[in-house]
Image: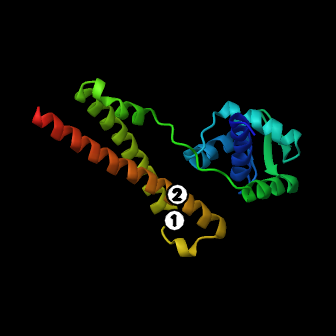
Amino acid sequence: MSSSESKIMALAHAILAALVEAPCSGYDLAKRFDGSVGFFWSASHQQIYRELSKLEDQKWISCETIPQAGRPDKKLYSVTDLGEQQLKEWIAQPCEPTPVKDDLLIKIFAGHVAPNQTILAELERHQKAHLERLSTYENLEQRYFQNPQELSESAQFQYLTLLNGITYERHWVTWCDRVIESLNQKIEKL
């Protein structure tokens, strides 16, 4: 399977994972996706709508059309038994850790060819972004997962995913702190 095939398959399965909670419209799915699965698997709303059509053709999801007065009909998507079976089979398949591809790490690796201030500015920008994302994740933890032992089974698995995001962002913030400190010490010696 090529890399693009695995990404397409993963998008289909990410949509199934977001829909398995409860049926919703494409619009609501895109919003739900942005606030949950979208934290670790990005897709545009256009990609999501395209994939919904494919999943419906494959009979992995079904669509119920709900008439609305004065507005276009609403399409409500839900996972079919076949779709849930496909999701279970996909979960059972081993997956490889995703290789790291990060522009910032390449910039740091070759940082000696640029002024230290340029590298510091980029690090500080990334640090700010990671701090903001960490704050978002910690707010989600406080809002929805205060008592992990009392969560439903599905919520416990969502919480475990959130813990990965929190750990990931804390790692980046700590790394940025260390690199910024190291570069500032280097600048002071000049």
Q: Nearer the viewer, residue 53 or 180?
A: 180
Q: Is residue 104 left or right of residue 73?
A: left
Foreground label between 1 and 2: 2
172 lies above or below 85 = above
Q: Residue furthest left?
A: 189
- The residue depicted at 39 percent of the width and 47 percent of the height is 172
Q: The N terminus lies in which quarter of the figure? A: top right
What amino acid is found at the position of numbered circle 1 in the picture? Phe
- Can the viewer see residue 140? yes
Circle 1 packing at 10 Å, graded few (<14), some (14-19), many (20+), is some
Q: Nearer the viewer, residue 23 or 100?
A: 100
**Disc 1 vs disc 2: Cβ atoms closer than 8 Å?**
yes
Q: Which mark is residue 145?
A: 1
Circle 2 packing at 10 Å, graded few (<14), some (14-19), many (20+), is many
40 lies above or below 93 = above
Tell me the SS state at disc 1. Answer: loop
Residue 47 location in percent, x, y? 69, 33
Residue 121 location in percent, x, y? 28, 31
Residue 34 location in percent, x, y? 59, 43
Q: Which residue is mark 2?
A: 162
Figure quadrant of residue 20:
bottom right
What amino acid is found at the position of numbered circle 2 in the picture? Leu
- The residue depicted at 59 percent of the width and 60 percent of the height is 158
122 lies above or below 36 = above
The earlier-in-sequence mark between 1 and 2 is 1
